[in-house]
Image (cartoon, rainbow, N blue to C red):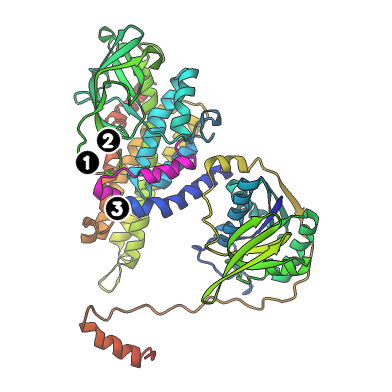
Amino acid sequence: MKIVVCIKQVPDTETKVKIAADGKSLDPAGVDYVLNPYDEYAVEEAIKLKEANGSEVTILCLGTEAATKAIRTGLAMGADNAVLLKDENAAGRDWLSVAKTLAEELKALQPDLIFFGKQAMDDDSAAVGTAVAQILGLPSVANITSFALEGATATVQREVEGGIETLTATLPAIFTAHKGLNEPRYPSLKGIMSAKKKPVEEKAAAVCENGTEVVSMALPPERPPGKVIGEGVEAVEKLIDLLKNEAKVL
Amino acid sequence: MELTEEQEMIRDTVREIAREQIEPRAEEIDINSRFPKETFETLHELGLMGVPFPEAYGGADADTVTLALVVEEIAKVCGSTALGLAAHTSLCCWPVFAFGSDEQKKQYLPGLLSGGQFGALAITEPQAGSDVGALKTTAVVSGDDYVINGTKAFITNAGVASVCIVATVTDPEKGKQGMTNFIVPTDAPGFALGSVDEKLGMRGSDWAEVVLTDCRVPAANRLGNEGDGFEQLMAILDGGRIGIAALALGIAEGALEKTTAYAQERKQFGRPITSFQATKMKLAQMATDIEAARHLLFNAARRKDAGQPFAVEASMAKLFASEAAVRACKEAIQIYGGNGYSREYPVERYYRDAKLCTIGEGTSEIQRIIIARHILQS
């Protein structure tokens, strides 16, 4: 079986991002990039299947040369090979442009199973996996928290408001991974040492027009500092007063 | 400092493991003097207990620089755990790899490097610390075996080890040329643990006295030839010092990281204490010491990887990094004030852990002697 995991490189969640001088993109200086955390679940699920049934796992990424770092993480975790669709302006693409480009490549790769993370931690569009399924006309389930495969039928679960929904889909199909799907492994030293020897095919990403345009970006307003109003029972009266009259939540 | 892609990725992975798995246990293992076996299971699984050894023996096929990065990252959050890994790797696995026969390597390395086993090295005796030539533990030929008798003190990992390299005297007439090392399985008859002392710091690392009473090992367990012992020990300690320097560097960095964050939050006289020059001077000195220690350490590690002489560089790195770590942790406590002296905050643990680095694998004074000898000889 051939599995493709589509990944994205995103700023480390601990990085303090700055907005670039143009006012509508992130300043890449001093930003540490990592494999998108939701994509780690996607990679882990693919590798678990590889361990169970000997599937071939390919990482597919649309990004700049620097995205190689995230790709290597996937390879170090256990994926077999990777394709990098290079675009120095990858960050400027909207979700539809990304989805069309990935779909084009996936047509060529002909996988039986495709995993995405449910969303990228940077732009949070949460659209690409589902959009690719739409373009390719494949069944898809977003936000899965469990995955089981029998023959060509995948049984998956996703959390819905107040409960759990169980669905089946016939492969080829696309699933986007949510937290809880599995516990992503740390890459082993052996995995890391062998990652560089695994093939990464680099090619120019097809140009796709954006359907939307980022007009501006702004950081959220700084939150006012908390205040300590006292301790124990004595503080209760004052707290209630502040909640009523200052915060106006009571 | 330029690292390879693999070195960087290993460092980042270990940093993540340290933050997620090791730091949350650091305080508890210190308080309870508990060796964190569950942590080491993870380290073994990921191949971190056999960093600089070939894959053929179960190692990760990485180098000394990588080992130093691994020790440093772990030491940033827990000195005890880093010490256990460093001692296992440099003091037991390395000598088997460097001096062992093919049979010995095949027999012992896979278990130690990736089979979940621990290793230890027993040199020090109650009466012979810095004076390694004054060992009294003897090994006497008896048929196809050697019979070992003696007592070893302060042996890191002794209580958890499957294999302990034991330094002995096989020919007392020949002094240092009469010393021989043995690979002793800890289940050998006559191998026993003695007292386990309470220690100031590194309380989560395992240490014990080792008592050898007519401990019988086959001649096949001799490391090299009779009389090779002293030179082997000196080479082992040269490499081990890179590990201790990395340990000290990590502890100092951990202390600085914690102290910087604390000082930025802590307010006195209505403003953060980082606004006072007294605090700035201390932080600047700590950071500069750390940077210097880093350069000394990685210079020594790179030389070892390149096959160049590195003994004096390793001594300098160990001397400077360990003393810098003690200074940094002392200042960390000073910046924390009363909180720093309290067990509620981590820096007093860093201070206690750091002190070991100025003693283990050759005291600071011994390092200065080694360095001076080098100057005076050349």
Decide whether residue B35 is among the magenta residues. Answer: yes
Determine the main secondary structure of the stretch shown in magenta: helix
Q: Which residue is mark 2?
A: B207
| Image location of residue B303, percent across then percent down | 49, 31
* Alpha carbons under labels 1 and 2: distance apart: 9 Å
Magenta residues (range):
B27-49
Q: Is there CB contact under 8 Å for labels 1 and 2?
A: yes
Do the residues at discs 2 and 3 belong to one chain?
A: yes
Q: Secondary structure at mark 3?
A: helix
Q: Amino acid at mark 3?
A: Glu
Mark found first going from the N terminus, 3 or 1: 3
The chain that hosts pointer 1 is B
Q: Nearer the viewer, residue B314 or A76?
A: A76
Q: Which residue is mark 3?
A: B27
Q: Is there CB contact under 8 Å for labels 3 and 1?
A: no
**In this view, the mark in front (1 or 2):** 2
